[in-house]
Image (tube, rainbow, N blue to C red):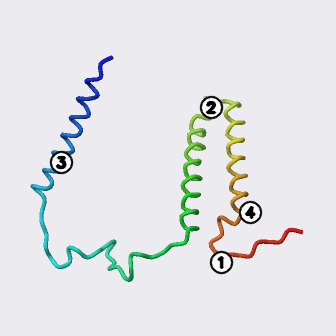
Amino acid sequence: MAVWPIGLYFILVVLLIAGMLIGSHLLGQRHSEKATGQPYEGGILSEGSAQVRLSAKFYLVAMFFVVFDLEAVFVFAWAVAGKEVGWAGYWEILVFIGILVATLIYLWRLGALDWGSPKRPRRRV
């Protein structure tokens, strides 16, 4: 088994990256205007500190969005191949969606999707 093609590919990739970095450094423009070092995004000058503390719930909801969005990709792929997978695929996607719904209900009941102020936990009798 020859390993030299992988080594050659690795060397070519490193040379290509080095060439792009050196070329952009040599050919790139250099600015030293007053506004060059100021942050600017979307036409709006920034106000306040960039060190804003965000609630952990923001990240939690963002992770839930990514997870459920990724699951939508699987459901879409199943829908595209619906005829080929037949009834077995139909029952499998029903189980898959059932697990997703159960997870969403669990997160909802847990309060992980609430953006409001933290509520006191309910006392169970």
Q: Which of marks 1 and 3 precedes in the sequence?
A: 3
Residue beneath disc 2: 83
Q: CA distance from mark 3 to mark 2?
A: 48 Å
Q: What amino acid does circle 1 point to?
A: Ser
Q: What amino acid does circle 2 point to?
A: Lys
Q: What amino acid does circle 3 point to?
A: Met
Q: What amino acid does circle 4 point to?
A: Arg
Q: CA distance from mark 1 to mark 4?
A: 16 Å
**Helix, strand or loop at mark 4:** helix
Q: Which of marks 2 and 3 precedes in the sequence?
A: 3
Q: CA distance from mark 3 to mark 4?
A: 52 Å
**Residue 37, horizontal then vertical, whole percent:** 22, 74
Residue beneath disc 1: 117
Q: Residues within 10 Å of mark 3 (few under 14, many from 20)?
A: few
Closer to us: mark 4 or mark 2? 4
**Residue 68, horizontal then vertical, whole percent:** 59, 53
At x 83%, y 71%, the residue is 123
Mark on residue 20?
A: 3
Mark on residue 109?
A: 4
With respect to residue 105, does 30 lie above or below?
below
**From the viewer's perspective, is 82 left or right of 110?**
left
| Residue furthest left in the image | 26
Q: Residues within 10 Å of mark 1 (few under 14, many from 20)?
A: few
**Helix, strand or loop at mark 1:** loop
**Residue 124, horizontal then vertical, whole percent:** 85, 68
Quadrant containing the N terminus is top left
Q: Which of marks 4 and 1 precedes in the sequence?
A: 4
Q: Residues within 10 Å of mark 2 (few under 14, many from 20)?
A: few
At x 26%, y 25%, the residue is 5
With respect to residue 71, does 51 lie above or below?
below
Q: Which of marks 4 and 3 precedes in the sequence?
A: 3
Closer to us: mark 1 or mark 2? 1
